[in-house]
Image (cartoon, coloured by chain):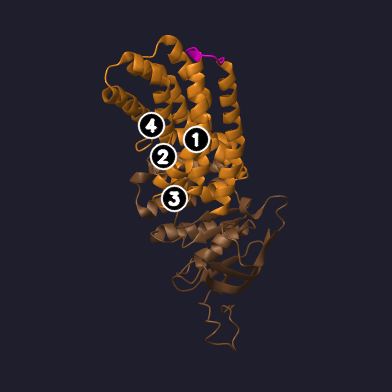
Amino acid sequence: MRLTAQDLAVRRSGRRIFSGLSFALGPGEALMVTGRNGAGKSTLLAVLAGRLKPEAGTVTASGIGEATLSECLHVVGHRDGLKSPLTAEENLAFARDLLGAPTASPRAALEELGLGHALRLPVAYLSAGQRRRVALARLLVCRRPLWLLDEPTAALDTASQAVLAGMMARHRAEGGLVIAATHQALGLEDAQELRIEAPREAGAAPAQKASADEVWW
Amino acid sequence: MRALRALVARDLALAARVGGSGALSLVFFLMIVALVPFALGPDLNLLSRIGPAILWLAAVLSTLIGLDRLFQADEEDGSLDLMSGSPAPLEGVVLAKVLAHWLTTGLPLALASPLFGLLVALDGRAMAATALTLLVGTPALTFVGAVGAALTASIRRGGLILAVVVLPLMIPTLIFGVSASEAALGGTIPFTTPLAILCALSLIAGVIGTLAAAAALRWSE
């Protein structure tokens, strides 16, 4: 699939978060979204996931047939979508049945992330890093071309970060897209970087464009 | 279909685990019904006359138990975002969640009501009639409640707001539920007339409630 965002602007509760963001991703490409805390990285991911409506601009996806964009993406963020009373296996089996297009069994996905022993443990018993790994295992149980990752390495140990880097590399080799909001290097090779800056006050600097800076490397 | 079956199964499993509200609403129902004879005194004629009304009132109140967490729990931990990424429509998701909620609150309540009828001195005929009206009427309560639950999903302590919003909308169901139970005990109207209206209310609430709750969830995003 191919994803294009054009001049995105978002306003939440009357406050301009960012504006004028554009990027384009083709098969196998990755985008790192950076910026200081509160700059709007998670907001951008929420817009891409279809949970927030942008004030201006468009997000278009091509090459996904009749499916809508929200049916073609995985989101792993701070709210991990895991139910504490259910076991890791039950959580993953539910996600697989809910999202469709299953590719791996919950056991295989958890073992890949080094959590095979937690298969039958309620998620409530797991540590923050282990919970995050269960949420990341969702990426493996069903196939979706676009991964939206919000600080995916938060609470992860170095070994798991390497596993995640390997997962993302394999996903991209299969033609998938990765968009990650992050403060750290994720091991994404030749990824584009999109830096979100705080918008300048329109009144304070009338000569300048009142839009977020966007820098490409 | 597979997605919705998985959702119903998950919600039933959650209700059965620690912290689920499965048995709680039934206990609450028992509490209210048990309190009434203490408040009114042991006047059996009075109790059996107002018994169906008490059972229905208790059913309306205990439907509210756990209703505030119907969508809020999924909203907080991100499961709702997961569901909106499912190929199943949001209306289907609402329907599956309401069905699971009714199976864990409304259905056990209707099945247990003959037993609780003993506490308010109902005879066998009245017990059966009340249980039947609860069986066909509680889906309406749950669907109406689901709209309120969807509206208050993103409000932190929305339980009380939910009750204030939802209780007035439950009045028609309450009226026809009680009048059907009382018609079974005698009177001028045949039992089937209010019962048919009660069934109609459940069906209408099923359609409107599903669409309205899904719209409320979309709007709050």
Q: CA distance from mark 2 to mark 1?
A: 33 Å
Q: Which residue is mark 3?
A: B77
Amino acid type, label 3: Asp
Which is closer to the viewer, label 2 or label 3?
3
Q: CA distance from mark 3 to mark 4?
A: 24 Å
Work out whether residue A103 can be spotted: no
Residue B162: image quadrant is: top left
Give me the chain letter of mark 3: B
Circle 1 packing at 10 Å, graded few (<14), some (14-19), many (20+), is some
SS at circle 3: helix
Give me the chain letter of mark 2: A
Query: Are labels 3 and 1 assigned to the same chain?
Result: yes
| Range shown magenta | B184-190
Give me the chain letter of mark 1: B
SS majority, magenta: loop
Question: Which label's residue is closer to the chain start, 3 or 1?
Answer: 3
Q: CA distance from mark 2 to mark 4?
A: 22 Å
Image: A7 above or below A142: below
Work out whether residue A174 can be spotted: yes
Q: Which residue is mark 2?
A: A86
Query: Are labels 2 and 1 assigned to the same chain?
Result: no
Amino acid type, label 2: Leu
Specify the colour of chain A. brown
Q: Is residue A33 magenta?
A: no
Q: Which residue is mark 4?
A: B25
- Picture coordinates of residue B113 (x, y %)? 41, 20
- Picture coordinates of residue A111 (x, y %)? 45, 46
Q: Considering the image in quadrants, where does the N terminus of chain A appear?
A: bottom right
Q: Are marks 3 and 4 in contact (CB under 8 Å)?
A: no
